[in-house]
Amino acid sequence: MMIHDVTKVVGKDKLRMRVGRGEGSGKGGTSGRGHNGAKSRAGWTSRPGYQGGSTPLLRRFPKRGFSNSDFRVDYHVVNVADLAKHFTAGTVVDGNALASVGLIRDTKLPLKILGNGDLAVKLNVTADRFSGQAKSKIEAAGGTVVLTPYAAKAAAKADAEAEAEATKKANAAKRAPKAKEVAEPAVQAEAKAEKKQEKKDKPAKKQDKTEDKS
């Protein structure tokens, strides 16, 4: 007799241990909880990480550096080669279409299309992000690339911020020569004052020389 012959009759799962049913079972009396203490009593709970009052391990470790986990964006990733396998020409491909054919699990995460593989089918693809290679391959096959409204808004915001930063740098560069021009008169005035002081000091030096000769 083999083990699979036994499990066919009695099943593969064991029944749970019934506690408190006499000492002969090994789990009678205190039912495996011991005699005293909070853990032996009904209603006892403990929060995760609690170490009986001592400083928890997480608090003992120093916190240094920076983690990007709070700001990272996770995407459903699909390559153009997968699109060519699952969709015919003229199909509108979006998150729901990809989920229906099993290329992504669900539509909870944003969608990103990458350019691995070849694409010879005309597709109208809607996603949150496209790599440069994926965009060029889709458009070369005669298809269209469409950003979702949220992604389009985010891209427009990023472009506006980049443009504002470039304008700020350009204005700063224009103001820099003016600052030099303003500084030059002050330098010239200082130079003139030094020359005047030198002229005043020369007669005094001549007098000193005449006194030495006498």
Image (cartoon, helix red, strand yellow):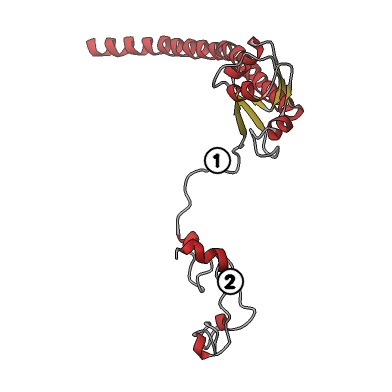
- Residue at figure coordinates x 67%, y 37% from the top left: 109
**Up-down: is 49 above or below 181?**
below
The image quadrant where one finds the C terminus is top left
Q: Position of residue 169 (x, y in %)?
A: 60, 18
Residue closer to the observer: 3 or 169: 3
Return the residue at label 2.
46
Task: Classify mark 1: residues with Cα within 10 Å, few (<14), some (14-19) or many (20+).
Answer: few
- Which amino acid, by three-letter code, is at mark 1? Asn
What SS does tag 2 mark? loop
Q: State how far apart marks 2 and 1 are (Cα).
A: 31 Å
Answer with mark 2 or mark 1, whichever residue precedes in sequence.
2
The image quadrant where one finds the N terminus is bottom left
**Up-down: is 150 above or below 214?**
below
- Residue at figure coordinates x 63%, y 10% from the top left: 140
Count all numbered tags in the image, as a single digit: 2
Residue 175 tag number: none
What SS does tag 1 mark? loop
Front of the two marks 2 and 1: 2
Asked whether residue 214 appears in the rendered view, the answer is no
Return the residue at label 1.
68
Q: Quadrant of residue 50?
A: bottom right
**Up-down: is 93 above or below 5?**
above
**Is residue 122 rendered to the left or right of residue 37?**
right
Residue closer to the observer: 155 or 44: 44
Q: Quadrant of residue 77?
A: top right
Q: Position of residue 116 (x, y in %)?
A: 54, 22
Residue closer to the observer: 14 or 146: 14
